Amino acid sequence: MRNARTSFLSGLAQNMPVPVRRSLASFFLLAGFISVGTPLAWADEPVAREHANVCATVWFTRGARVQMEADGSMPLSRRTILQPPLPTDAGCQADIEIHSKTALAALMGPPVVTEQQQRVLLRPAANGAPPSITGEATVNAWGKYARLYGTTSIDGLGLLDNQYRGLPLREGDVIPGESVDASASFTIYARESGDEVGKLVAPHATVSVASRRVGKRQVIRTALGLSECVPIEYVRTTSLGPMVIAGEQILTKPTQMQVTDWYCPAQSIVMRQDISEEGKVQHIQTTVVESLQ
């Protein structure tokens, strides 16, 4: 049994550089499951500094259902349900449900399915400090050979991507960068037997977004039709840091992506993201945005 367990974990570790590393990276990209398709207010708007109003300025006040689809070497289909937010003394609290399917096109295999329940707290800018966001999530993910179940946490400054509503967005404007720290702890189970085969821990992951430059407004074709949108370009760096699998440390290298957010003022959301990594381009389209109430 021990030899089989060791063999299973060794195989998982050997595959870490591509499928697992990129799948885990998506857990830490808060922008991936909240802010893309969700209108976020600019931190310096006066109304956003008041806790009583922060939910109204940064979330869909009646909740929302957002569907996104991505092409390229790592196709993605993600459904996000944002429950109506709750104003609190500390800021704005929101519960988010995510169901996604991600695959590596080159492997031609079944997708990795992820179900996630997340609670986040957004604190508005105050006393010269930038806005911040914290959260915890329970994640259940499974692929062809293994299932991962565990928790993730985030602690970030600047709200990450797509906080464009309320900005003038003039061509040539520069928007400050942002950063988030994250951690994850998963138990690994073999799919066929259901036996626990080890732990996967990533205690110090980071995502940073460099200063973003605003381009010239253009009419582009989105999943919902033609729309006038603003291209906003930046570099996103993701580092999973050292990961531990069954007591064995695995070192990972940071990855950099060139990102263009196409923010469409009429819809108050980013309708498309163009992401370039290692010479490959992926397009993420917002295909559905609708209120829950």
Image (spheres, helix red, strand yellow):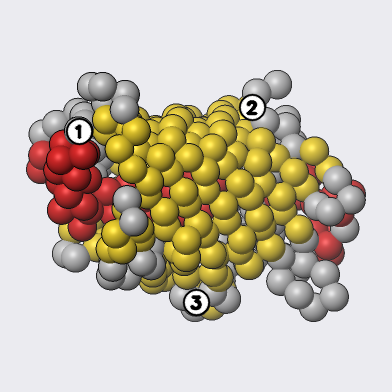
Q: Which of the numbered marks, if any, corresponds to residue 237?
A: none
The amino acid type of the residue labelled 3 equals Ser
How far apart are the alpha carbons under marks 2 and 3? 32 Å
Q: Position of residue 172 (x, y in %)?
A: 49, 78
The residue under the point 54% across, 69% down is 179
Residue bearing the label numbered 1: 1
SS at badge 2 = strand
Q: Position of residue 275 (x, y in %)?
A: 31, 58
SS at badge 3 = loop
The amino acid type of the residue labelled 2 equals Ser
Q: Which of marks 3 and 2 precedes in the sequence?
A: 3
Q: Which of the numbered marks, if any, corresponds to residue 211?
A: 3
> In the shown orientation, is residue 153 left or right of residue 258?
right
Residue 26 visible: no
Residue 232 lies in what quarter of the image?
A: bottom left
Depicted 266 relative to depicted 238: above or below: above
